[in-house]
Image (cartoon, helix red, strand yellow):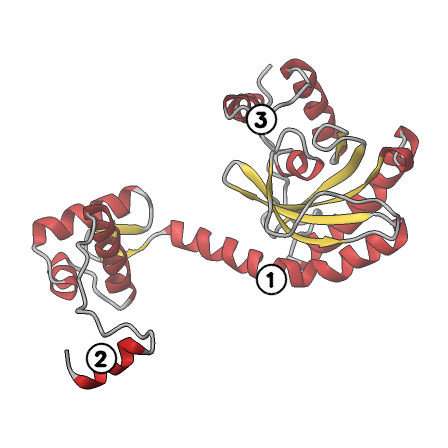
Amino acid sequence: MKRSEKADTARGAIPDMPQVKRPSLAGTQTLARGLEVIEAVAAGATTLVELATAIGLTRSTTHRLAATLIERRYLAFTRGAGYALGPKLLELGYVTAQQTDLPRIAREHLEALSASTGDTVHLGILDGSTALYLDKIQGTRRVEIGSRIGERQPLRSTGIGKALILDADDAQLRECYDQEARLGKGYTVPLEVWLTRMREYTKLGYAFDLEENEDRIRCVAAPIRGANGTIVASISVSSAAQYMDDVRMHGLSFEVKNAADAIGAALGFNPAAVQRVARPQKR
């Protein structure tokens, strides 16, 4: 060891260690290559030869990657024109833009709703099979709501979660209920009772949490629709059950719906111009 290294070691410093290159997992390499294919098409590659050259792989390997991406709609292929970016990327870009702008657009409406009701207001989106909280405005009442921004909550027991799936058909609702049951999440409302409530909520355009997710906490929630009429988010007003009897909850539903519609309008939703996506209910 050199004198300088000995001095560093004496002071508690660790001498430079040789860099060890970790082997990449096959799945990680495949994912990276797939992304390179998408990037190559975005850069202008339209033929298999151009793609293979751009990412440095054989034509057969490149063709397999491209075929998978076409199957998943990240790429499209037409004879004569070659490869192009697929509709899935448009969908993801649309959702990303909405999610990026959503908290900023919704904030003033959430603050106004919290100020007028005195209660805690949440904003959430569907994230896989859970509700993800994007924002929270604490109410003025001395009521502690056990929720956090960035937290994920169940769909079947929360008001904000139910509002996110109001367009789901019975089969999808059953799957949602069963999936959360399989995960071992405790819930006391039987399936058929829950389905009956969800059908009624769908007709009304709003949903309730009747102390189902948090003891002695009730919520009124409503969906936010985007430019194409589909549900992109939801908001809820939450408070202690002593401030949320049935009469007040039904009265609040109009205020919550109005706030959700105002946010939707800022996102481009126009009920008069966009036909609401309605899925047939399976009885």
Name the residue beneath numbered marker 2: 6
Relative to 204, is 80 on the left or the right? left
User: Where's residue 3, x and y in %?
Assistant: 18, 85
User: Where's residue 162, x and y in %?
Assistant: 66, 33
Find residue 90 and report its image quarter. bottom left
Name the residue beneath numbered marker 1: 101
**Which amino acid lies under the numbered mark 2 shown in the image of this protein?**
Lys
Secondary element under disc 1, as helix, strand or loop, is helix
What separation in Å lies between label 3 and label 2 (alpha carbons)? 57 Å
User: Where's residue 29, x and y in %?
Assistant: 21, 53
Residue 202 vertical position relative to residue 281 in the rendered view, above or below: below
Secondary element under disc 2, as helix, strand or loop, is helix
Residue under the image location 25 percent in, 51 percent down: 28
Secondary element under disc 3, as helix, strand or loop, is loop
Crowding at label 1, few (<14), some or many (≥20) Cα neighbours within 10 Å? few
Name the residue beneath numbered marker 3: 185
Which image quarter holds the N terminus? bottom left
Give the mark nearest the N terminus, 1 or 3.
1
Relative to 273, is 130 on the left or the right? left
